Amino acid sequence: MFVENLKDDFYDVIQGNRCLLLVNFDIDAICACKILQHLFKNDNMLYTVVPVQGISDVYRSYRENCDDVKYVVMINCGGIIDIVGHLEPPEHITFFVVDSHRPFDLCNIYSESQIRILHVPLDEDDIPEYEEVFRDDSSDEEEQEEDSDEEESRQSKRRRLNEEDMLRKRQRREWEEKRDTILFNYSQYSHYGKSSAVLMFEMAWRMSKDSLDMVWWAIVGSTERAILNKVESQVSVLEAGNLQGQVSRLSHRQGVDAEKQQQSALKIIYDKDLQLALYRHWTVESSLRHSMTTAVSLRLWSIRGEQRLKELLAEMGLPLAQSKQKFSSMDLNLRQEFRQMVENLATKYHVEDVLGASFTLQFGYKFKYCASDIVYAMLALLESSSKDSSPHHCFLDAMDCLSRMKKETLEKGIDKAKVMLASIFKTAQGILEMKKVMNAGSFLYVIIPEGVVDSRLFSHPHTLLMLAQFVLKAYVASTKRKGAAAAPLVASANYDFEEETCLLVGIPPVCEDQPRSLFGKAFEQAAKNINAVMDADYFDTTIIRLKTQDRSNFFDALATLLT
C-alpha cells in the first residue's frame, strides 16, 4: 500500500524502535540513507545499515539481521520484487519501501498490512486495478477438493463438466489472458521515479528538522540521476529549481539564527557553471577531453577532434602550458575568465550543452566542490572493489564523501574518478576507431575486448553504463547510418573470468529524452528462448549477468525478439 503522509504514517511509526536499513549501492540511496541517519541520530534511535548490491543480498542481509527488528526500511531496493512472497517474514515485521525504480511489484502495492511504499501515486504510474490482476475465486478450491467416497467423486466429476462449470472456466481463461496483457503493458518498460534522497529531505522539511547539510545530500542524489541519464532533463531542471528554493530558505534561516554561527562558513551556491567533469580539480585539457558533452561535440576520439581541441584552447586565449596544469594552479585571471571564455565559443564549436546551472558547496576557504564532483568521486569509490577492498568498505568510503570532515576520502575519490573517466574515454576511443559497434538491426551492441587496460572497471554496472552512454552518443554523432539515433544499445563486458560470466547493460536510444527502457522484459524473454541461465540480480532490470558462452546466441535471440 502507498503511504503519502510520511511523517504520520512512516517516521512517527518507526520512531523509538530499532530499524534495519537495507541500502542499495547507488548514490541516490546513499544520500537518502544519510538523511535518515541524521534524523535517527537527533532522535536517539537505534538502527542497523546494511548495503545490498542485489536481490540475493536482500535475502541474505534480511535473514542475518532480522532478529529483534520490527521495521525494515528498504532504500532503492525491494520495490520491484514481491517482498512478502520471497522473504516470508513474520506478520509483526513491517517493510517501508523508499525506491525510485519503476514499476513497483503489484503484490507490494496491494499489500494491506506488511508493505508500505513511500510514494504518492501518479497518473503516469498507470497502475492496474486490483480486480484486473487478482481474483478471489472460491470455485477453484472446490474443484481441488476430493472426497474419498467414489460415488461422490464421480458426481463431482460430472458436475465439473456441466455447462455452468464450462462457462466459468472460459470466463476465467479470458480473464487470465486479459490479465497477462495488462501485466505485460504495466511492466514492459523500466524507468525511474522521484529521487529517494529528495523524498527523504522533503519529509525532514515537513517535520521542521531539515538543514543545509540535508538539502546538499538531496542535491547530490538528484545530480547523480542527471549525470547517469536516469530521468529526463526536464525533470532534473524542475527538481533543481525546487531544491534551489529550499537552499534559499535554509540559507536565510541560518543567517538569522545566532545559535548556528559555527556553520556560518557553510554555503550552497546555485549558479550557471560549466558542465565539465572535475575541471576545478583537474587540468582544463583533461576535463574537456573526458567530459562526455565536449568529447562528443568535438569528436575527440579522432585526429581531427584533437586538432579542434587545440584550436578551441588557442582561440580562447588559453596558453597550452596553462591548460595542461591543474586548474587551481593556473593564473588567477585565467581561472576567473575561464567560464566566459568557453561561453563565448560554445556556439561556434557546437558545445552549447556545456553550460548549465549547478550547485556548489563551500565550507571555509579550502572546501569547495560542485555536486557533480561529489557524484563522480562517490561512483569511483563505490565501484573500486577488489581483493584488497570489499564492496562493504567501498560503500562506507562513498558515504564518507558526504561528510565535510572527510576531505581526504573525497580527494581519494576524485583521483579515482579521473582514472575512471580516462579509462571510459580510452575504451570508447578504441571501440570507435576499430568500428566495434555492431548493428543487430533493431538495436546496437558492443562487447568490451578482454585485453582492454583497466577492464576490471567495466565489470561494475555504473561504469559500464557510463561507457555505453558515451559510445552510443559518439556513434550517433559520427555515423552516417540512418536511424542510428533511434537505436538502443547493449554493452557487455567480462564480469568474472573464473566463472566465465559477463555483464550486460541496455540503454534507450539517444532520441528519447524520457529514458524508459524495454530491455528488462526483452532480456528475460531472450534468455528463456535459448534456455540460457540469466542472473537478473540487480534492482535495475536492464542490467543482467550471463554465461559468456551464451552471449552470442543471446544477442541473436534478442535481435529476433525485437525485430
Image: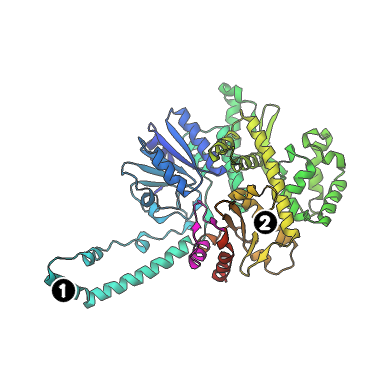
Disc 2 residue type (three-letter): Pro
User: SS at mark 2?
Assistant: loop
Is 459 covered by the magenta stretch? no
Provide the secondary structure element on which disc 1 rests. helix
Q: Which residues are magenta?
A: 523-547
Q: Position of residue 490 (x, y in %)?
A: 61, 60
Query: Residue 215: which numbered mark, if any?
Result: none
Q: Determine the CA span between mark 1 and mark 2.
A: 66 Å
Q: Is residue 54 left or right of residue 14?
A: right
Q: Residue at x 39, y 44 (%)?
A: 95
Q: Is residue 131 left or right of residue 490?
A: left
* Residue at the front extreme of this rendering: 498
Q: Which of the numbered marks, if any, corresponds to residue 449? A: 2
Quadrant of the rendered structure where residue 249 is? top right
- Residue 136 located left or right of residue 541: left
Give x and y (percent) for residue 112. Answer: 34, 50
Mark 2 packing: few (<14 Cα in 10 Å), some, or many (20+)?
Answer: some
Quadrant holding the C terminus: bottom right
Residue that label 1 marks:
154
The residue lying toward the viewer, choosing from 389 and 169, is 389
- Pinpoint residue 84: horizontal percent, then vertical percent: 36, 49
